[in-house]
Image (cartoon, rainbow, N blue to C red):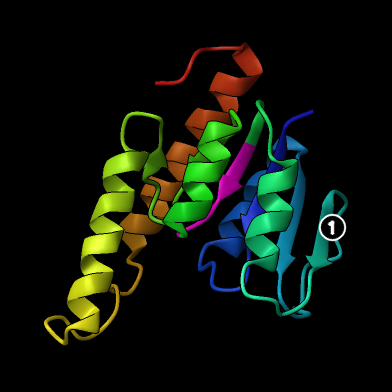
């Protein structure tokens, strides 16, 4: 059965995921380092994994498999899940695939180096309504592809 795993600690699109899960009758597991409020909705559960550095990432990566969807902005986690055959979306709706996750990792590493050198300050831009719409559109598309057994696009 199609399952959505959410790297939940900093995920800004949880309300959108809940709506899609209810409409499509999907199982959703939110994985977090600490307790958070989740709706009392059938099929939605919270897995609290503790505060070890990569505990949530490791928990998701160990379980994600072909036919699952992972929602994360964490590029190393995205890479691990793509390698396991899961579909991966960022909260902005960007799909991570075998074709683009390597360059996303390289860009992440470069940006980390630039931030460490003080060349870049500040974080990512806030999520816009357009980003939320793109996320919903991509999530619906991926769900339909998995249900039809379509290859990745």
The answer to whether 79 is drawn above or below residue 74 in the figure is: above
Which residue is drawn at the image coordinates 61% and 22% (left, top)? 146
Q: How far across and down, in percent of the image, does residue 20 sit?
A: 63, 45
Indicate whether residue 1 is drawn in magenta.
Answer: no
Residue underneath mark 1: 41
Residue 25: name its quadrant.
top right
Q: Is residue 54 visible?
A: yes
| Viewport quadrant of the C terminus | top left
Q: Is residue 18 visible?
A: no
Choose between 146 and 115: the one closer to the eye.
115
Side of 108 relative to 43 (left or right): left
From the image, give the main secondary structure of the stretch colored magenta: strand
Q: How far across and down, in percent of the image, does residue 51 sit?
A: 71, 80
Q: How far across and down, in percent of the image, does residue 123 sit?
A: 29, 79
Q: Residue furthest left?
A: 119
Indicate whether residue 71 is drawn in magenta.
Answer: yes
The answer to whether 50 is drawn above or below residue 1 in the figure is: below
Which residue is drawn at the image coordinates 21% and 63% (left, top)? 110
Residue 70: name its quadrant.
top right
The answer to whether 92 is drawn above or below residue 48 in the figure is: above
Side of 30 relative to 87 (left or right): right
Range of residues picked out in magenta = 69-73
| Viewport quadrant of the N terminus | top right
The answer to whether 76 is drawn above or below residue 138 in the figure is: below
């Amino acid at each position: 059965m199609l399952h959505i795993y959410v790297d939940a600690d900093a995920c800004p699109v949880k309300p959108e995921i809940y709506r899609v899960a209810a409409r499509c009758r999907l199982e959703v597991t939110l994985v977090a380092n600490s307790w958070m409020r989740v709706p009392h909705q059938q099929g939605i559960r919270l897995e609290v994994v503790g505060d070890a550095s990569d505990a949530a990432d490791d928990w998701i990566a160990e379980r994600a498999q072909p036919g699952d969807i992972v929602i994360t902005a964490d590029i190393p986690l995205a890479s691990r899940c793509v390698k396991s055959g899961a579909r991966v979306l960022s909260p902005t709706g960007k799909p991570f695939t075998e074709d683009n996750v390597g360059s996303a990792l390289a860009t992440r590493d470069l940006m980390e180096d630039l931030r460490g050198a003080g060349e870049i300050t500040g974080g990512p831009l806030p999520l816009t309504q357009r980003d939320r719409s793109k996320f919903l559109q991509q999530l619906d598309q991926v769900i339909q592809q998995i249900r039809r057994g379509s290859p990745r696009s």
